[in-house]
Every structure is written in structure tokens, then in C-alpha cells.
Image (cartoon, grey):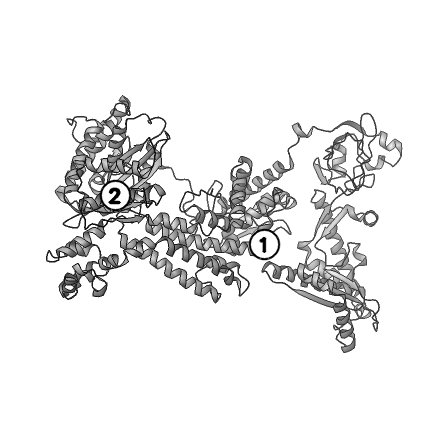
Amino acid sequence: MAQVAVSALPMENEESSESRMVVTFLVSALESMCKELAKSKAEVACIAMYETDVFVVGTEKGRAFVNARMDLQKDFAKYCIAEGVHEAKPPCPTNRMQIDSGETEILRKAVEDYFCFCYGKALGTTAMVPIPYEKILRDPAALVVQGLPEGVAFQHPENYGLTTLKWILENKAGISFIINRPFLGPANQLGEPVVVTDAKRSVTLPSESCGTISVKTEPMEDSESQHPCGSSEVIEMELPMEDSTQRVPSETNEDLEVEVKIEGSTNSSTITNSAAGVEDLNIVQVTIPDNEKERLSSIEKIKQLREQVNDLFSRKFGEAIGVDFPVKVPYRKITFNPGCVVIDGMPPGVVFKAPGYLEISSMRRILDAAEFIKFTVIRPLPGLELSNVGKRKIDQEGRVFQEKWERAYFFVEVQNIPTCLICKQSMSVSKEYNLRRHYQTNHSKHYDQYTEKMRDEKLHELKKGLRRYLLGSSEIVGPEQKQVFADVSPNDSVAVQPVEDVAGSLWEKLREKIKSFVAYSIAIDEITDINNTTQLAIFIRGVDENFDVSEELLDTVPMTGTKSGNEIFLRVEKSLKRFNIDWSKLVSVASTGTPAMVDANDGLVTKLKSKVAMVCKDSDLKSVCCIIHLESLCEQKLKMEHVMSVVVNSVNWICSRGLNHSEFTTLLYELDSQYGSLLYYTEIKWLSRGLVLKRFFESLEEIDSFMSSRGKPLPQLSSQDWIRDLAFLVDMTMHLNTLNISLQGHSQVVTQMYDLIRAFLAKLCLWETHLARNNLAHFPTLKSVSRNESDGLNYIPKIVELKTEFQKRLSDFKLYESELALFSSPFSMKIESVHEALQMEVIDLQCNTVLKAKYDKVGVPEFYKYLWSSYPKYRVHCAKILSMFGSTYICEQLFSIMKLSKTKYCSQLKDSQWDSMLHIAT
């Protein structure tokens, strides 16, 4: 708050000093209101006038504007005088003098007693200590009094008026004393003189340039009866470092800590200001401890204080909910749900909050008042279950695996651990809910078809497969593991077979299945394993005449030579010949779109098209680029490096350093944050950027506070433009993550994946229109920080750029759009858009009401299982579309299995063994 005197303006008369104090206090309240408005991103400028003073109040920008316009202030003052706009004057002081003087004396006595009580508390005692008003007037910086009205200085209560006395008593809970320098000497309020000496020379402590001084006094027994305040304790005082000139010798450390032990009679009647009074003292020792060995750093002290306060609150909260152990305090829920939990006994002027937000002095006062603090739960906190807060002890629950779960969920117990027979995943607890959820989430789609006797046969087959898989190779499993898993098999007479033999039978079944395919497609991708060898994964997706779809691993080929398109083609051709596959039934090939795959001259797709054309002239091999990879490439258009660089650098600085990460996680715990830490950004992971940005934004205040406390402030976190950019990027990446997740998964139909992309393009068009009108309905994060009606206009170019990139990269699917539409919407397709060879059958199909009703009931692709054989050409067309891969997601999943399985301990297996193991695993 700025106050400017305008002496040139005449005033009719002067107000009393008390009235001026009232005005100053009210203007201070106005300033506090402006600070709250500033937190809401509002800018305020206010000019107030009282007598010859002009007060400038407002936010930082508002005050800067008004202070730069002195002419505006003077004009306002002249206008107020000319128009006679003055505040109503308070009652004249003479009227106040008519109040009963007895009441005034009572109030003054009450204020004086309370001041003495606060002063004693600041000295570390609960008794009232007389205040040396004269010494305080000579050295005002030695004592700071907080909570007095604005403009009222600390002085003897006899100098206060009736109004001020009443205000102090009404608001005494907010008044506190802070002693910067104690008044040492014969007139010490605690009744004890303190002398600081050195073994060699006397050291005079400077009045304004001292470090942290710890003074420990030990009174004699006879002093205890005379001075109840002089208990044995350590008073720690932090004196301001205002004067850089030290009067202490140079070898004295900045953070000087002096421990003085005083023994002898401290009877005040025998001590005077003379040298003889000093000689009566028995000074035992003066030590300056080594900072590195005997004194904890200030950070460690603060951390210890916070831990002690947090433990205190946790213990009190546990008592409140009826347990005999500490319970984590939900600080945020208590703050946002007032009235649910009541905290009594907090020191005056200290508000309950997480220890991370408390000042050092407040934490010390809380620890001093620990026995008086009490938590009371009035009503349950929303979203918090208080009835079961004890730590779960699984070994005491007595859970037993039940045999019926084997048939119901395909689980067996291996060494007292429930293990899934299908995916080999183990559960930590033998609980039916966990097993049922795992089965329904991962396997019910494919295994619910087995019922009654077929289910028993499948269970028997899975048990044998698990045993063979685990015991098939003596190089992998030792004798002790064989004994552990021997009980898995239901029949002990089953012979142990090598893993190659198990896989060999699966290869034979795959060959038979491939012969029944009406159409098939392949998906190809590559990865480098732990041996730095490029592995080429080839998957096949085929459709038989009953429209049953199968996705299987065809081969994994190590690429030890060059990685050109011709070399890849030779490896693929060899793998297809191995299964005697009919080239004329090959419909499409899906890849990641690398030059070796799609090069127009020497790419794999070009070679495959030539091969198929040689076998069947009418065939047209389709090339499909992985939709998920295309979506990921389009997302890279939203780089916004000025945002990502700050986020990545901040996360790396916090998480890559052990001390920073530990202290930051502690801060999040104390603040009851929903997150325990930040996430690293990994560019190759599809969902990484969106998750990292979302967590960073929701932890913005904690990160800003932590970085500032470590001397690494981030000015971007205070920039509204930067925060809006971050919020927009959070919303867009979350939309893209939602699209990415919907494109993942097994047995996805290419038409459904293409529909998802088309829907996202339509959303981009809608968002572009909404942003032009500053409608942020679909950008909740940006909406939460937006303060301007034109904020949305800044991001329209980003939406347009992203839309253009999607349209460009999905041009391949545009070529097949009519064929895809004929498969997904045969009854609404225009005949002119259908290929001539299919037009007659499509017309018959569209006029068939029975099939139309079936289509409406079951939908695509189940409908084609009921399609009559009287539509042979259309059935072949639908089988081709159904066989197409929309992405190489299945290859990526295989690489994840390979990364977890092919470690340094089993990287020397033969290629044939790895092929067998991977085929069994998939």
C-alpha cells in the first residue's frame, strides 16, 4: 500500500490520530481484498483519500499504473475537495472522554496483562513477564508484535484509546510477540543475568549482526523458589544480518552458535551492575561447536520439525477414529470439508494445515501444545473409509484355494500361489473376486465358449501345456523347479516333452488352419533384442469359410545382414513357403511405414505386389500403414517445445536426484496429494506425454513451491500464457491418448479402427469451430485457467495443423474407403459406388428383409457368419476385409513379451528354441 501526502491541498480541520488509525486499518483491509482478487487473476487499482493523505491500493500492476500517474492522484484529490466528498468524521475525542474512566482503566489493565502473558510465552514460559517498555522504545527492532491494527504501534496500554483497547481485546487471539534480541542484564525479565565470555578475551556481540545464538542457563536451587520463570531450557534466537560489518573476529563463523553454562547463585538481590556483581558468577565454559559435526543443518532441522508435527497429527487422528496407532491425516479432505473433523487445542493464531505449509515458529508452538491438541470426527469425510484403517495382513486371513476355481477360471495353485493356466500370471491372494476379475477381463471372450465336457478337456490340456512349458528344456529349468511344478499336471504318467515338440504340434495345427483360410493378411514389424540383433516378427490373420478369424505368430526371423527391402522380402518369402501358403489369397500387408517396407522402388510392399501379381493377375495387394503409428506421428505435430522442455527438465531435475526426489515425495505426502511422485517422459511410449503433462499440471503448485525452495525458480510457472499453453496441451494429449487406447487390442476390425479415426477428424472440425467462438467445453483444463474471451483463438492453428496431418497420413485408407464402407454398411451403400462385379449380389442383399433384420440384431462382423452361400462374391469380399490388419499392435505386444523373457540369463538359447517358446507364449 502506498501513501502519498498532498500538502498543497487545504483541509478545514484535522481529525484525531485514532480516526486516522481507523482509516488506515480499513484501507489495509481493502489491500488484503485486492490481494485475494489478484489470486483470481484480476487486476485492481484504487485511490483513497483522507485529509491530506492519498492512499494507492491495488494489485502490483494496478499500483504501478496509478503511481505513474501522479496527475491522476492530484486531480482526484482536488475533485474530492471541490465536491465535498468526505468520509463521515468519527465522533470527536472529547465525546469519548465522557465515558466512565473506571471502564477504561479495567480495559487497560486487561490489555497490559495480556501483553505480559504474550511476552512471557515468547520467552518460553507460561507465566506473565513484565515488559520493559522503555528498552523497547530505545531498541524497537528487538521485539516484533504481530496482529495489531494497521498503523497502531506497540506501546504501553495507557497510551491507547478506548476504541483501540476494545479492538485489541476482541482480536487478541491473533496477537503474538517475536523476540529478535533479548534484553540481557540485571534487569532481565527472567531474573537472571547472562554474561558471554571467552577463555582468552571478551567478545562483544553486535546488536544487529549476529547469527543463531543458543543461550543455555542453569539456575541454582535457591533461585527456583524465587524465579519460577527461570527454568533450565535453551532459548534459540535468530538475529537479523543487516549489517555486513562484523565486530567479532574473522575466525568467528557466520552461523555462530554459542553455548553458555552459568552456575552459581542467581539471587537478584546480590547482583549489581558493578564488576563485583559479575565476579559472583561461576562461568564454567564457553564452547563454539563445529558446524559439520555437532550441529544439524537448517534443512534437516526443518524436516525433523515437520516430521514431528506430522507424527503428532497422525497420532491424534488415529486416536480420533478409535485406533491405537498413527493414521495418515487427509489434510486436503479436512480442509475442503469443514465441519467433518474439528481440531481443538491449536495454539492461538495457528491454523490447522499440512506441516509443509506451516512456519517454523508455528510448528514449535504446536509441539509445545501437543498435549492439548485433540481431533474430533463429527461426520465421515467424503470418499474416506474410516472403519477399516488397519494394515491388511494377508497371512492372517486364512484364505484357501478352492478346486472349483480351476474349472471356473482356469487357475491352479502352484506353491500356494494361484496361477493362471492361460497367461501364466499369478495372483497374490487366493480370493475368488481377484481370480474372476482376471478371467473376465482377459480370457472370458475366448474361453466362455468351452462348456461342460469341452471345458474339462480344455482344462486338462492347459495343465499339460503348463507343465510341458515349464519342464520342457533342461537348460532353462533346474531340478528344483521341476519338483515345484510337478504337481501341476493332473496325470503323473504324462511324459515330459521338450519345448520344441510341444511347439511342433502347434505348428502342425497352424498349417492345417492356414489351409482352410479363404483370405489372409500379414503384419510385419522389427525390433532389436538384447543381443543387438534385429528380430523380424511376422503375424498372419486369416478368415475361413465360416468367418472365424485367427491371429497367429507365423515366424520370427533374425536379421543379421542388411536390412533392405529385398532382404526382408526374401525372409518373408521363405517363411510363407515353410507353411505352403497360397499367395493368391494374400489380401494386405501391414507395416510401420518405414522406407524398407514401403519404398516405391525396392520396398517390401513393392516386392510382395510383384509376387502376388505373378501368381494371380487379378489380385491387388493392399498396403496398410499401422493406424496407431500414424496417430502417434500426427501427435508429434503438437510439439510445443517451449512447454515440453520446461516440463521434461523439471521432472528430470526432481526425479533423477535422490535427495530431491525423496524430499518432493515427502512434500506430496504431507500435502495429501493424489499422486506420490512425477512421471518420466519417454518419447517412444505412446501414452507417455499425455500422462506426464496431466500429472505435472495437477501438481503445479507443489512443483513451483519445491523448485523455488531449492533455488531453482521457474518463471514459466507464473506466466499465464505459458500455463494456458500447458493446459491446452494437456487437453489435446488426453484426447489423443483416448483415441490411442481405443485403437489398441487384439482382433480389431480394420473398418472399426478407421471409423475411430474418422470420428476424431470430425471432432477436430468441431473443436476448431468451438475455439473460434471461445467455447472451451471440450477443453476442461484450458477452461479452468482461461481468463480472456480470446484465449481459444490462439490454438486454432494447432487444431488445423493436426487435422491436416491426419488427412495426409491417412490417404492410403481413402483409396479403400468404398470397399470398407461396403463391408461395414452394406444395406445403406449406394449401388453406384459398388464394384460392378458385386452390384447384383449387393442389390439382392439390400432387398432381403430377413438378412436386414439379422444385420440390425447382431451387427458387424458377426452378421457375416449368417450370410447365405448364395452371395459367393460378396462373401469373398467380406472375408478379405475381415482378414486385414489395421495395425501392428500384435507385433508390439510380442516385442514386450520378448523383452521380458529374453534376458541376459537366457539370451544364448537357439533360434529354434526361441521360436517355439514365443509361439507357445502367444
Q: Position of residue 492 (x, y in %)?
A: 17, 27
Q: Residue at x 76, y 59 (%)?
A: 151
- Residue 581 horizontal side relative to residue 664, left or right: left
What amino acid type should be assigned to the residue bearing mark 2? Leu
Query: Which badge, 1 or 2, comes first in the chain's sequence?
Result: 2
The reply, left or right, for residue 587 in relation to residue 758 is: left
Mark 1 residue element: loop
- Residue 214 in the image: x percent, y percent? 72, 35
Density class for disc 1 (Cα within 10 Å; few <14, some 14-19, many ≥20) is few
Report the residue at 21% width, 46% height from top: 613
Q: Mark 1 = which residue?
A: 719
The residue at which mark 2 appears reads as 608
Spatial CA distance of label 1 from label 2 is 55 Å
Residue 695 image offset from top left, x and y in percent:
47, 48
In the picture, which quadrant includes the C terminus? top left
Q: Name the image quarter holding residue 4.
A: bottom right
Instruction: Using the image as rendered, state which of residue 74 and residue 30 is in the foreground.
Output: 74
